[in-house]
Amino acid sequence: MFSKALPTLSIVAFLSLWQGLALFLHSSLLPLPETVAWVLWQQCQSGELPYHLGVTLLRLVVSFTISMLLGCTIGIALGRNEKLNAFFDHWLVIFLNVPALVTIILCYVWFGLSESAAILAVVLNKVPNVIVTLREGTRALDKDLLNMARCYGFSRTKMLRHVILPQLHPFLMSATRSGLALIWKIILMVELLGRSNGMGYQLHLFFQWFDIASILAYTMAFVGVIQLLEFVLLKPLDNLAKRWR
Amino acid sequence: MTTVHIQIHDKTHHGAEKPTIENFALSLNAGEFVCLVGQSGCGKTTLLNSIAGLDPHYSGEIRVGNSQQNPQIGYVFQQPCLLPWRTVRENIELVFSTQAIVPKLQVDSLLDFMQLNAYQHAYPKQLSEGMRRRVSIIRAFATNPDLLLMDEPFVSLDAPMAREVRELLQQLWHSRPHTVLFVTHDLREAIALADRLVFLTSRPMRVLREVKVPIARNLRHDVRIIEAFRDELIHNYHDLHPLL
């Protein structure tokens, strides 16, 4: 019973600490929790927050989908083919280490301040992570199960659906979770540098006005949406796939 | 059912090192139970994998009678190789190319025969090791293969469980005769199961000797008869001593 209440307790403790610090400092640099909540409510009522949040979420969905599809395909191919992996391995390490800021700037310089350049920058930053995760997962596939499927003449689709994807499930979930966490941070940077809407653009404005309450309100809204995705979509999917364990 | 002819060739160049299999040929009569007996490491598993087309280093030709079609092969691996995320029934039915052609009644009857009817919706993790082996045997029998390969399917089972699964296999094969190529290094097990014993040498693998088992099937549960035939083999064939 007590352990079930622990997550709620930790949130209450955090809010209390925040409240105490804000009261103690009495500075506009750290507004009270209720002030942030009030700003959040006002931004929602004015329609500003839902619009910018929606734009950012749309960019997140598009770039996440492209990154996952591309990363999974390339990752599985590299995991299955040693020669292909040897050819691309160095490039993968290079792309993993290129700073996100550099990719974003180059995309904007080369392709202009457009929506497609923004999406491309996010995808280029995320894809190497997905590739590495899926490549390791593919290398760890159970060879006995693959042999069994080959021996019984499983088609490619059947092999993928019944033998490969269930084994890759933990790696897919890991790439999805880390992907969501990483992509929205990159999207904010992309929006801050070259878009005229979205959360990143708004945060940039609030920064110029030193409006800390709005910055915190927008952050809380976005974190809330990501948490909602985790509980409404990812967790149930995860539980469904792991029901045999 | 017709005679099955097997030919395996080495595809790669091994240099000075001798290949596991150079040229191997064996014919099995329809419905015959043949046991391959050889020392550990002589390449028995490699041979079965080559026959099943799973080893890229060897090419094989499996001909069933005069048919030009690819033969249907069933394989009972050393480990059960069941998909942990599929139930017992799903594991069996997945070997059919589409769900529409699954012979439900046959699967039911096989499950019944192997005493697994009550567990058909269980996941492999919920079964004992012996039960998992039985599922892999059902899976191999379910498609009515032209050739059934079995690679020491009772290895790593404790003696009572191995005996129980072996007896069930004997009964199943008796009621649904299939052409079987069974690999083992245990001569007693081979005598208890086989119509014909094929003794193998190692590197390169070749047939050292073939011996028909003259013991009637209904007498093979008698350990003394099995032991007597084993002693007879040891006494008569000195070239088999390293294998026995």
Image (cartoon, coloured by chain):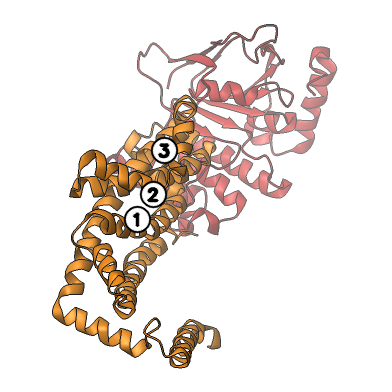
Residue B175, horizontal then vertical, whole percent? 49, 37
Residue B8 visible, this angle = yes
According to the colouring, which chain is orange?
A
Mark 3, Cα crowd under 10 Å, few <14 / some 14-19 / many 20+, is many
Asked whether, in this view, residue A52 is left or right of residue A24, the answer is left
Question: Which of the two marks, 1 or 3, is nearer to us in this view?
Answer: 1
User: In this figure, which residue is indicated by the disc labeled 1?
Assistant: A186
Residue B93 visible, this angle = no
User: Which element carries disc 3, helix, strand or loop?
Assistant: helix
Name the quadrant of the N terminus of chain B. top left
- Snapshot quadrant of residue A120: top left
User: Which element carries disc 2, helix, strand or loop?
Assistant: helix
Name the quadrant of the C terminus of chain B. top right
Asked whether, in this view, residue B147 is left or right of residue A219, the answer is right
Asked whether, in this view, residue B12 is left or right of residue B244, the answer is left
User: In this figure, which residue is indicated by the disc labeled 3?
Assistant: A76
Asked if labels 1 and 2 touch by Cβ distance under 8 angstroms, the answer is: yes
| Badge number at residue A100 | 2
